[in-house]
Amino acid sequence: MNDKDVQVLVTGGTGFIAQHCILALLNHGYRVRTTVRSLAREVEVRENLKTGGVEPGDRLSFVTADLCADQGWAEAAADCVYVMHGASPTPTGAQTSEEEWIRPAVDGNLRVLRAARKAGVRRVVLTSAFGAICAGHGRMKRPFNETDWSDLTSKHVWPYQKSKTLSERAAWDFIAREGQGMELAAVNPVAVLGPALGADYSHSIRLIKNLMDGQPGNPRINSGFVDVRDVADLHLRAMTHDAAKGERFLAIAGESMWLADVAKVLKQRMGAATGKISTRVLPDWLVRLGALKDPALRGAIPFLGVNLNATSEKAVRLLGWSPRPREEAIVATAESLIRLGLLDSAADGV
């Protein structure tokens, strides 16, 4: 069977990482099926893929499926050799308990894995998150790696991080106990940047948008960054490489950066488009004060001044992965926001 005959299921086709995975698969000759909660979004997904340079025609098909229900998953997984599972229920903020974060994420992973096993899928690549690795540890004396798991006994683990940790652990437990030979690999990206394909983009890209839209300064927040195109490439390698079976792979380009240094990269590289960017570092007390009124800031408080450096040495060594520099990912994000007209009108400067 050559690649052109191989069908791959990519869950959550409206997602930022998922769409770049679809692009990478199509560019490598695979046929792709993707799930959406409503077929009304097929047009949007195809437009985004066109923005990414691909018009797949009948090499891409859509199935309606929701992670919170069984319907559609058997059809979605049928005849697929591989599954890339990145879809995850993302609460809107109206949720009142941790359970409303955790249960859909755990059940969603298990639902997809059961459907894949029943369909005879060879390997599932799970899009997990750095949030399943880094939370609850405080200050580390070394870079995070794949042996690390978020410490859920800490009071500083937020529901999102807990949901990512427990849902990934549930996936590994399922494979060990009920996988019946089906293989699993996991990709754990840090903040994912790179070219936006449309107006529905990741929370990480919002970091760059906020900078370019003129946020008044930068909390002492440290983060790793990686380009979404390299995350998609790592998914492909994890899907087919023998060495990826049963492994997790942390995806980061170079070392982590402070947010103020991200702002400096943009100002150095983006010229006229950076007129509203501030490189000012906000004092911790001011951020804590702001968090009293702004729930979005509260999750940042435990990470103020904490270096969240990590290493992707394992992916480089085992899979030959070679991500582009973090600065390129930052600039590509900004350029796409300008190109697609997604910045506040007074901020783009062009």
Image (spheres, rainbow, N blue to C red):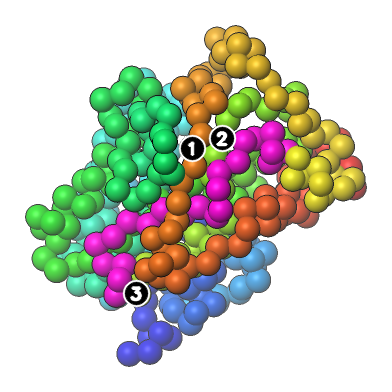
Label 1 CA crowd tier, 10 Å (few <14, some 14–19, many 20+) = many
Identify the magenta region: 242-263
120 or 287, nearer to the observer: 287
Do the numbered discs 1 and 3 sit on residues whose CB atoms are within 8 Å?
no
Q: Which residue is mark 2?
A: 222
Q: Amino acid at mark 1?
A: Leu
Is 259 magenta? The answer is: yes
Q: Residue lying farthest front?
A: 141
- Three-letter code, disc 2: Asn
Name the residue that disc number 3 marks: 241
Mark 1 → mark 3, Cα distance in angstroms: 28 Å
Q: Amino acid at mark 3?
A: His
The answer for how far apart the CA atoms under marks 2 and 1 are is: 6 Å
Q: CA distance from mark 2 to mark 3?
A: 32 Å
Q: Is residue 347 left or right of residue 311?
A: right
What percent of the width, then of the height, locates residue 192? 54, 49
Q: Which residue is mark 1?
A: 308
Q: Earlier in the sequence, mark 1 or mark 3?
A: 3
Front one among 289 and 101: 289
Q: Residue at x 70, y 25 (%)?
A: 281
Image quarter for residue 175? bottom left
